[in-house]
Image (cartoon, rainbow, N blue to C red):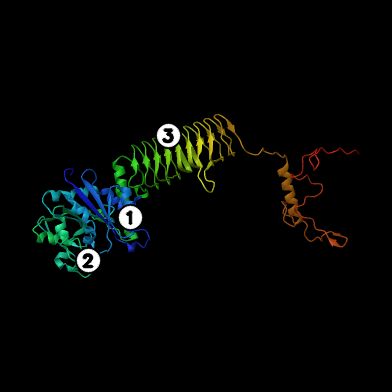
Amino acid sequence: MPDKSSLTIVLAAGEGTRMRSRLPKVLHPVAGQSLLAHVVGAAPKGRGTSLAVVVGPDRQDVSDEARRVRADTEIFVQTDRLGTAHAVLAARAAIARGVDHILIAFGDTPLISASTLERMRKPLNDGAAVVVLGFRAVDPTGYGRLLLNGDRLIAIREEADASDAERRVNLCNAGVMALDGKTALKILDRIGNANKKSEYYLPDAVAIANELGLKAMAIETSEDEVRGINTKAQLAEAEQVMQTRLCQQALDAGVTIIAPETVFLAADTRFGNDVVIEPFVVIGPGVTIGDGAVIHSFSHIANASIGRNVSVGPYARLRPGTSLGDGVRIGNFVEVKAATLGAGAKANHLAYIGDSSVGENANIGAGTITCNYDGFNKHRTEIGAGAFIGTNSSLVAPVKIGAGAYIGSGSVITRNVPDDALALERSEQAMRPGWARRFREMKQSGKARTGVKSETGVKSGMGKKPAETNGKTKIKSAATPAKKANKSPSKKPAGKSASGKPARKRTK
């Protein structure tokens, strides 16, 4: 309704003690966003709209979250928690400025939709002073009942005060309310606290409107949409409802989700055309997935941009700051963080790419690691287009690998590598012919001397007395080869002395 101004007041001052958490209730997440962020996001926005959030004392974190989502948020503090009407009047200054419509929502109802809040404004245009959102409860026990006379709402009756007939009514109060801006303060200022808790309750606005000869009305929505969160169990229920909603929206948009009940999406996930999501995929906030991409099973993605025709997983992790160009391949057990991979680049298995840029069509071999952290600071690795990083290589940042360069397998690269160069850093392979056979023979002879069964299964050395020399027992170490055995592999090659100098030939 662009021709009508509006003020949305979000009540977020509750302590949420039943959540049993040091985190404020409205900051708990559903689908990757705080409860408060969902509600603020549903409020009308654009020209002629304003937003006020009422917080408790010393809740800068809640204020910061509201302004993170919407920078023009005005914050008001409810110093004493004396009921919902009292909380609304904490934003009196915003109400007094004068607007056409006032919407009152709750920061712990993350499933409320923008379309429902917009529907609540229509009766105001038709002359209503108060509009209450209601729902048909499967079990209405504990809820206030909306009592209608035709299309007019005549009262909200709390269950403790309801007659038997009124308790059979299943149209219940969701708490969300809309007020005509011209009469809002007149109604709110008349709400008293003559009740057991001496608090000021917003539902009393309906009776006051009727007393003033003003019209009150109700509109309906689903029970799921107005779920309030007071416990961790209710938080989990809301998550389930939100995931069902998000998956259905994705399916309707053409995304193939093979097993929706196993997939978790964020509220802000964006999909291109012909995207396929396999079972057991978790997508956190800030993810965009391009046309034709396939996300294989057991992958976890957050704050990442995925290009067209990209393949991710299975068992891949894309951490914040990841950007994958078109046609990139990220395979099993590959982790990418704060890195950009150009079109056609591949890391097909068992690699870590962090704080890096990888050029187009580069190949990252299995076991490759960009060593980006020195214990104090993060450093970047740059890999040029078409470079080939061999298996089990460590790139110690900061380091640059040139375009078309080739890194030999098993290398530890600590210096920049020019374009089209080969870099190889590993010890020269040593060959000792026959060493393995001699080693086995030595071990087997040692076992025989200590009485262990030989390959023939016959015990040797059992029952014999140790050899005696000068009255002392002489025991030969099992690990010491006989004098006639071949030289130990640790000895110098033939032709050299122990010092490494050429040995003199002995004459007979």
Query: Does residue 49 appear left or right of residue 254 in this picture?
Result: left
> What is the residue that sits farthest to the right in this orientation?
508
- Closer to us: 390 or 452: 390
Disc number for residue 382:
none
Label placed on residue 327 = 3
Instruction: Characterize the local packing of mark 3: few (<14), some (14-19) or many (20 or more) Cα atoms within 10 angstroms.
Output: many
For the residues labelled 2 and 1, the Cα–Cα distance comes to 24 Å
Q: Is residue 245 left or right of residue 124?
A: right
The answer to whether one can see residue 221 in this image is: no
Residue with the mark numbered 1: 62
Q: Residue at x 47, y 33 (%)?
A: 359
Which of the 4 quarters of the picture holds residue 317? top left
Task: Please name whichever residue, 47 or 410, is drawn nearer the observer in this view of the structure.
Answer: 47
Say which mark, if any, is on residue 199: 2
Residue 8 in the image, given as x and y percentages of width and height:
23, 51
How many residues crowd mark 2 within 10 Å: few (<14), some (14–19), many (20+)?
A: some
Residue at point 81%, 60% (across, down): 464
Looking at the image, residue 479 sits to the left or right of residue 176; the answer is right
Q: Nearer the viewer, mark 3 or mark 2?
A: 2
- Mark toward the start of the polypeptide (2 vs 1): 1
| Residue at the spot 58% in from the left edge and 31% down from the top edge | 422
Residue at image point 23% right, 63% down: 83
The amino acid at mark 3 is Gly
The residue type indicated by label 1 comes to Val
Q: Position of residue 165 (x, y in %)?
A: 14, 66
Between the residue at mark 3 and the residue at mark 2, the CA separation in whole angstroms equals: 61 Å
Q: Quadrant of the C terminus?
A: top right
For this rendering, which residue is in front, 104 or 164? 104
Secondary-structure class at tag 2? loop
Position in image of residue 133 (x %, y %): 19, 55
Circle 1 residues within 10 Å: few <14, some 14–19, many ≥20: many
